[in-house]
C-alpha cells in the first residue's frame, strides 16, 4: 500500500488516497519517516 501511495501522491495527495484505502494518513507518514527509501524503489534511488 505504501508503494501505491508513493506512486500516486503527486497526483492525488496522501490524505485522499488514505481515505479511499481506509488507512490513517499518520500511518503512511510514520512509516515513511522510519523508512524513507523503502517505498521509493531502486530506480528512484539510483543516480
Image (cartoon, rainbow, N blue to C red):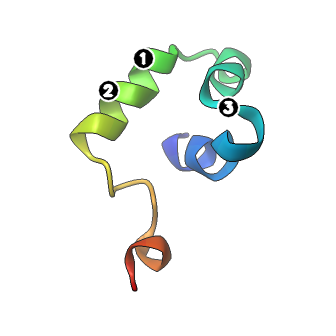
Frontmost residue, 38 versus 45: 45
Instruction: Check the picture and name the quadrant holding the C terminus.
Output: bottom left
Identify the mark nearer the N-term, 2 or 3: 3
Helix, strand or loop at label 3? It is loop
Disc nearest the viewer among 1 and 3: 3
Frontmost residue, 41 versus 45: 45
Q: Give the left or right position of residue 38, taking residue 12 as reference.
A: left
Q: Give the left or right position of residue 34, taking residue 29 as reference.
A: left
Identify the mark nearer the N-term, 1 or 3: 3
Q: CA distance from mark 2 to mark 1?
A: 6 Å
| Residue depicted at x 74% and y 20% | 20
Q: Based on the displayed image, in which of its 4 quarters is residue 17 positioned? A: top right
Disc nearest the viewer among 2 and 3: 3
Helix, strand or loop at label 1? It is helix
Q: Which residue is mark 3?
A: 13
Residue furthest to the left in view is 34
Q: Based on the displayed image, in which of its 4 quarters is residue 1 positioned? A: top right
Check contact, mark 2 vs mark 1: CB within 8 A: yes
Look at the picture and state if 20 lies above or below 11.
above
Helix, strand or loop at label 2? It is helix
Q: Which residue is mark 2?
A: 30
Question: Which label was assigned to residue 26?
Answer: 1
Amino acid at each position: 500500500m505504501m508503494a501505491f501511495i508513493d506512486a500516486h501522491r503527486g497526483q492525488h495527495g496522501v490524505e485522499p488516497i488514505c481515505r479511499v484505502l481506509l488507512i490513517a494518513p499518520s500511518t503512511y507518514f510514520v512509516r515513511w519517516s522510519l523508512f524513507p527509501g523503502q517505498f521509493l524503489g531502486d530506480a528512484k534511488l539510483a543516480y
